[in-house]
Image: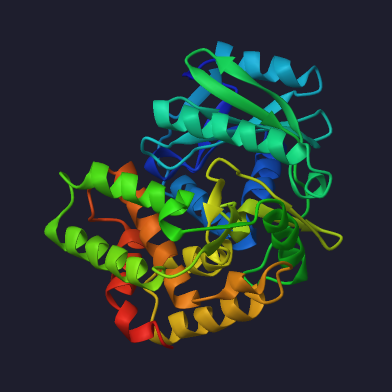
Amino acid sequence: MLASSAGMATHRSYPSGREARLIVPLNHRWCRKGLRFFFPYKTRLGLQIRSLRQFLRRVPSRDYFCEGPALREIKSKVGAEALHAVIRLGTPGPFRKQTVLFLNENGQEVAVAKIGSTPLSIRQVQREVEWLRRLSAEPSMRKYTPTLLADGKVADAWMVMQGVCSGAFVSSKPGFPHIRFLSAFQDLFREECPYHETQMYREMSRRFEALTPHLSQIWMERASRAFSHLDAGYADGPTTVVAAQRDFAPWNMRLRAGQLAVFDWEYASFGYLPLYDLFHFFLMPLAVRSSITFSKIKHVLGEVTRLGTLIAGSPQGCKAPSLQLLAYLLDVSLFYLESRDGLDTGDTVMDCFGQLIDQFPLWRFA
């Protein structure tokens, strides 16, 4: 989307070098707009401090860019009002995607584009398009999701253009806006079926089978034990499953006038356990920072069980919360392992969730 340029640059990395999280316009006003849109205050402050330190150390920056043909093509799909672009860099790996915020001449957000350029990230972007179309057809869900504006191939990548979900960043404590969203979402796609016929079980089994030649002995034994616990726990009777957003975290939502808007739908799926999204909301922000203590996992189990009873629908959704938590931990861990071709070291989330899976006999009756 951008080409390296020193003389005719329109953008630069922010901060510079390996710490870069954004590609921002050289104009400080548009840079600040992008920072405010993508990051809450504390994260924003940290990035500003890093950038200031680089300036004071006189760290030379060679990370200057000009708009390339691909970015100009994407801007053309928004229209003439898309004058400025701020690009958020995705996490490196096979699922990496870039997110582009377009601003008009007054600095107002007009559209957001998500671009995938690897085979897996392209498939994820296409899945998001499918879900946005599906949800836009449901009157009860339109107010919760961004508007699909356009999608299609751009150079060797795939792009989805969406309306902007404006509003305040969401705190780490879910409330009634979250429950109203989950009630509406789950009510559309609730069903009962044997556990071994659920999409969640099939997807975990597929990943585990594909990863088997690459997994360490520790993860082979860990995943096998988790599957055994789940097989035994769900052996009798049908299981209630719903659709899950599967990236239901505070950074993927905004709150405006008491109304929750949820974006990043590329991981959504049918046939998942009802407490999955609530566990993700509580645990992912903790796991990316540090380990999770036994007392904390007991607290999360209690909170998720309490909130789960408030979600409209079948009371069976809160059945066996410890088993639902184990299934969530295994599903996320296998996803991370797949994205790293079985490499199980150097990732905070996998280390944290792996330890929690090992501790299941201790907290299952907490």
Where in the figure is residue 122, as x and y percent of width and height? 48, 27
Quadrant (top left/top right/bottom left/bottom right) for the C terminus: bottom left
Viewer-proximal residue, 61 or 295?
295
User: Taking the image as drawn, is residue 325 in sight?
Assistant: yes
Is 329 left or right of 316, judged from the image as shown?
A: left
Q: Residue furthest right?
A: 257
Residue positioned 46% across, 24% down in the render: 117
Viewer-proximal residue, 155 or 147?
147
Is 271 left or right of 18, judged from the image as shown?
A: right
Is residue 308 placed above or below 97 in the rendered structure? below
Q: Residue furthest front?
A: 237
Is residue 75 placed above or below 362 in the rendered structure? above
Is 276 left or right of 40, judged from the image as shown?
A: left
Is residue 58 placed above or below 354 in the rendered structure? above
User: Taking the image as drawn, is residue 26 in sight?
Assistant: no
Viewer-proximal residue, 314 or 7?
314
Residue positioned 78% across, 18% down in the render: 79
Where in the figure is residue 191, as x and y percent of width and height? 61, 56
Is residue 269 placed above or below 99 in the rendered structure? below
Residue positioned 44% across, 63% down in the render: 328
The quadrant holding residue 291 is bottom left
Where in the figure is residue 178, as x and y percent of width and height? 71, 64
Residue positioned 56% across, 64% down in the render: 281
